[in-house]
Amino acid sequence: MAAKTLVVACVLILGLGIVTNGAPSPTQAYCKIVWLLGVPCDQVNMAIVTQVKAMGSYKLGPVTAALIQANHTSSVGQIESVNFTMMATAMSMGCHVEGLSVSAFWFSLLDNGTNYCNLHNVIQGSGLSKAPGFTEYTNEWLCLGLGLSACK
Ligand SMILES: *[C@@H]1O[C@H](CO)[C@@H](O)[C@H](O)[C@H]1NC(C)=O
Ligand SMILES: *[C@@H]1O[C@H](CO)[C@@H](O)[C@H](O)[C@H]1NC(C)=O
Ligand SMILES: *[C@@H]1O[C@H](CO)[C@@H](O)[C@H](O)[C@H]1NC(C)=O
């Protein structure tokens, strides 16, 4: 019983740590996703950049080995800022990718999963979701509208 409580507490504290670490203002809709892949980060970076360039609704910004920045225009004419941050994992040849999508305006708080889809569609379209060891982590706290999302 005590052990179970401890596990729950740890999960909550970890979750909150992720939320408060660089989370944007709560008045904006946003989504944060963490992916783990058994692929080197330089290959992940290339695949994401290629995919963002291929998708007409994205405008690619500055790209470095560790950070890819872009803007996305959603069909309703709203703009979201999208970042992909890459870090090599301790496990050899792996990459830890953090995706963050933030709506520019407070009134897009109920975004129907737009921010989730902004991130998910890039990873799906790039083929990275089929890479060895691919795992996606997020939840309703980190990713507003996750439960409502129906990505096209
Ligand atoms: C993204 O949008 C922001 C805010 O409008 C702007 O400052 C930035 O230059 C844009 N970046 C790109 C790559 O278009
Ligand atoms: C993306 O990264 C840039 C540079 O660190 C930062 O200024 C911007 O707020 C980030 N945008 C998002 C959506 O995290
Ligand atoms: C969300 O979905 C509902 C129902 O389909 C729609 O009425 C609403 O306009 C959508 N909101 C946004 C921001 O897309």
Image (spheres, grey):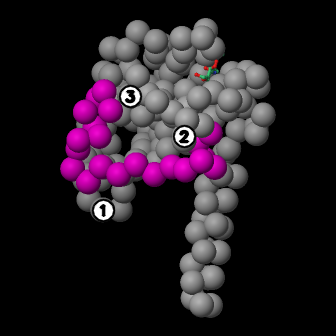
Q: Secondary structure under badge 1?
A: loop
Q: CA distance from mark 3 to mark 1?
A: 24 Å
The outermost residue toward the bottom is: 2
Circle 1 packing at 10 Å, graded few (<14), some (14-19), many (20+), is few
Across and down, in percent, residue 80 comes to 60, 22
| Badge nearest the viewer, 3 or 2 | 2
Residue type at mark 1? Answer: Met
Q: Which residue is mark 2?
A: 146
Instruction: Considering the whole magenta stretch, tell me its main secondary structure.
Output: loop
Residue 68 in view = no
Q: Earlier in the sequence, mark 3 or mark 1?
A: 1
Q: Which residue is mark 1?
A: 91
Residue type at mark 2? Answer: Leu
Residue type at mark 3? Answer: Val
Circle 2 packing at 10 Å, graded few (<14), some (14-19), many (20+), is many
Q: Which mark is residue 122?
A: 3
